Image (cartoon, grey):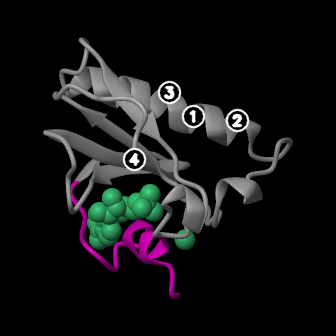
Amino acid sequence: MDCLFCRIVAGEIPARKLYEDDQVIAFNDIDPKAPVHFLVIPKKHIATLHDLGEQEDKALAGHILFTAQKLAREQGCDEGFRVVMNCNELGGQTVYHIHMHVLGKRPMSWPPG
Ligand code: AMP
Ligand code: ZN
């Protein structure tokens, strides 16, 4: 298995887990860009947002978003937070297993660089 996040799902690489169920896992980013910075990923390997299937992955995509919402609240981000999904090299993606970044507890500027 050469996917880093599949290895985290399999428990082969440790992660600071915040949440897990049968479909998703959330863990703190190893190189946080904000006081709160965690990732929500599907357990299923999907390389990029282009590979997310509108039919077969619709419920999963919603579940990722609502997991982010719930955990952002739990992490005290009621005042505001940001979610980001980078797609492919031009979009800044470095790990090719889709993940939703959730960043909070600092002011955010727009647009991102
Ligand atoms: P992206 O650039 O959108 O693909 O984001 C990948 C994210 O994964 C980056 O923010 C990394 O800091 C993070 N990351 C890489 N390796 C690990 C790891 N072993 N545990 C937690 N987060 C990681
Ligand atoms: Zn994977």
Residue extending furthest toward the top: 79
Say above or below: 74 vs 44: above
Residue occupying the point 52% across, 46% down: 85
Say above or below: 18 vs 10: above
**Residue type at numbered disc 4:** Gly
Residues at marks 3 and 1, CA–CA distance in whole angstroms: 5 Å
Tell me residue 45's x, y (percent): 61, 66
The dominant secondary structure in magenta is: loop
Tell me the number on the disc at residue 110. none
Tell me the number on the disc at residue 63. 1
Query: Horizontal placement of 15 versus 70: left or right?
Result: left
In magenta, the rendered stretch is 1-16
Q: Quadrant of ligand 1?
A: bottom left
**Residue type at numbered disc 3:** Phe
Residue pointed to by mark 4: 113
Q: Secondary structure at mark 1?
A: helix
Residue extending furthest toward the left: 35
Residue occupying the point 18% across, 21% down: 76
Residues at marks 1 and 2, CA–CA distance in whole angstroms: 6 Å
Dividing the picture into quadrants, the one containing residue 88 is: bottom right
Say above or below: 1 vs 44: below
Query: Horizontal placement of 58 versus 43: left or right?
Result: right
Residue pointed to by mark 3: 66
